[in-house]
Image (tube, rainbow, N blue to C red):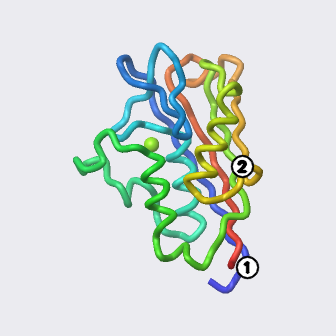
Amino acid sequence: MSSQFRIGYGYDAHRFAEGRRLILCGVEIPYERGLAGHSDADVAAHALTDALLGALALGDIGGMFPDTDERFRGADSIELLKQAFALPAFRAWKISNADLTIVAQRPKIFPFTGAMRTRIASALGIGTDQVSIKGKTTEGMGFCGRGEGVEAYAAVLLERK
Ligand code: MG
């Protein structure tokens, strides 16, 4: 790895379920349903973790925190994100910026993006100006548009220290 920069890209999707809390980027959002998953199902934190791991070709979140492992049942995905970024391979790198898009027809994401940026920045030890979070709908198209679930996309740029 001789390059000065590495880019990472992550994607995740989770299905809505009754009786679950809705957690996105570590922020609980008041809504009638939450997301199904082995952990807290924070789809956005998962996409960002995959982007970080992908930047250094370290595999993915499912490999690092298997959903067959009882230790990760109900896990706080911000803690998983921190654990991934604490891998020794990241010691030579700093995060230049991270950019996330959360796709949900409902609820509205925008009112929570400030709190989400603060949570992610603090988890990764970077500034809020290095974290971008955008909410999108799909104008009713596809599984997000029908309210079946939430998708998240994340890109991250690492710069050698
Ligand atoms: Mg996931």
In the image, residue 122 lies at what x, y percent? 60, 52
Q: Nearer the viewer, residue 156 or 130?
A: 130
State ligand 1's quadrant: top left
Q: Mark 1 or 2 closer to N-term?
A: 1
Quadrant position of the N terminus in the picture: bottom right
Mark 1 CB within 8 Å of ligand 1: no
Q: Are there few (<14), some (14-19), or many (20+) residues within 10 Å of tag 2?
A: some
89 vs 102: above or below: below
- Do labels 1 and 2 touch, CB within 8 Å? no
Farthest residue, direction top: 32
Asked whether, in this view, residue 41 is left or right of residue 25, the answer is: left
118 vs 15: above or below: below
Asked whether, in this view, residue 3 is left or right of residue 80, the answer is: right
Please give the label number shown on residue 4. 1
User: For the point 25% across and 50% down, which residue is it?
Assistant: 71
What's the amino acid at mark 1? Answer: Gln
User: For the point 64% across and 44% down, which residue is it?
Assistant: 118
In the image, residue 47 lies at what x, y percent? 55, 47
User: Marks 1 and 2, how far apart in space?
Assistant: 23 Å
User: For the point 35% across and 18% down, which residue is it?
Assistant: 19
Q: Nearer the viewer, residue 132 or 154?
A: 132
In the image, residue 4 lies at what x, y percent? 73, 79
**Quarter location, residue 101:** top right
What's the amino acid at mark 2? Answer: Thr
Q: Nearer the viewer, mark 1 or mark 2?
A: 2
Please give the label number shown on residue 161. none
Residue under label 2? 128
Farthest residue, direction bottom: 2
User: For the point 67% across and 53% down, which residue is it?
Assistant: 155
Q: Nearer the viewer, residue 45 or 127?
A: 127
Residue at disc 1, secondary structure? loop
